[in-house]
Image: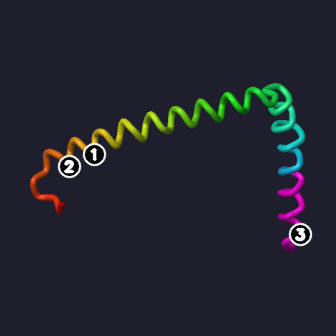
Amino acid sequence: MNLQDFVLPLGDLIVWTFDSLLVPIGEMIGRRGWEIGAATVGIAGIALWLKMQAKYNKEAANNPDQLK
């Protein structure tokens, strides 16, 4: 057995995954769906970040041993 016996089936699996799964999903969702999904993920990320930042600011305000 050589390296080619492992690499070629892996390449075939990647091509099959792209052709059989990713292309149909992309066609179903369409361009508008991706834009809405990206915006939703971005807004959720910003909300999570602001929530965590408020928690850290509150902890810092209550900690007298920190450097200022």
Marks 3 and 2: which is nearer the front?
A: 2
Q: Secondary structure at mark 2?
A: helix
Q: Between residues 52 and 19, which one lies in front from this camera angle?
A: 52
> Residue at the location (17% across, 46% down)?
61
Range shown magenta? 1-12
**Left or right of 64, for residue 31:** right
Q: Amino acid at mark 2?
A: Ala
> Residue at the location (50% across, 38% down)?
45
Q: Amino acid at mark 3?
A: Gln
| Quadrant placement of the N terminus | bottom right
Are the residues tagged 1 and 2 within 8 Å (C-beta)? yes
Where is residue 57 shown, x and y percent of the image? Answer: 26, 44
- How many C-alpha atoms fall within 10 Å of the one at disc 3: few (<14), some, or many (≥20)? few
Q: Which mark is residue 60?
A: 2
Q: Which mark is residue 4?
A: 3
Which image quadrant is residue 8 in? Answer: bottom right
